[in-house]
Image (tube, grey):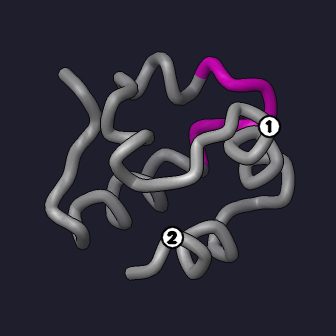
Amino acid sequence: MEYETFLAKLSKPARNALLHAEILSFEQIATLTEKEFLSFHGIGPKSLPVVQEALEQVGLTFKK
């Protein structure tokens, strides 16, 4: 999955939160724990399964 395709699946607030934090790749998301990811303003619990699925598709996971 391409990162731009993934971003399109997120809500606008979640997408804007990632862009504002300058998170521009799956690899950057994978450096975060789930708790850190959810702490961004605009990212809620509904975003988590979408992100986890996208990370799995590219062979990555959240940091433990």
Q: x, y (%) of residue 57?
A: 24, 72
Measuring 67% from the left and 63% from the top, which residue is drawn there?
A: 10
Pick whichever of labels 1 and 2 is earlier in the sequence.
2
Specify the quadrant of the image occupied by residue 34: top left
**Residue 43 placement (x, y as % from top left):** 69, 37
Q: From which residue to which does the magenta span run?
A: 39-46
Disc 2 crowd rating (10 Å Cα; few below 14, some 14-19, many 20+) is few
Q: Secondary structure at mark 2?
A: helix
- Looking at the rendered structure, which numbered label has been put on residue 3? 2
Up the image or down, 23 lies above or below 51; here it is above
What is the secondary structure assignment of the residue under circle 1? helix
Q: Amino acid at mark 2?
A: Tyr
Residue at 28 percent across and 36 percent down: it is: 62
In the rendered image, residue 41 lying in the magenta stretch gets the answer: yes
For the N terminus, the quadrant is bottom left
Name the kind of residue labelled 1 in the image: His
Residue 56's x, y, as percent?
Answer: 22, 62
Residue at the image point whose x is 57% and y is 52% from the top: 24
Left or right of 45? Residue 54 is: left
- Which quarter of the figure is the C terminus placed in? top left
- Dividing the picture into quarters, in which one does residue 4 lie? bottom right
In this view, 18 is above or below 40 = below
Asked if 57 appears above or below 37 in the picture, the reply is: below
Residue 53 sits in quarter = bottom left
Main SS, magenta region, reads loop
Q: Residue at x 42, y 40 (%)?
A: 28
| Image x and y of residue 22, in percent | 67, 39
> Which residue matches tag 1?
20
Identify the mark at residue 48; answer none if there is no mark: none
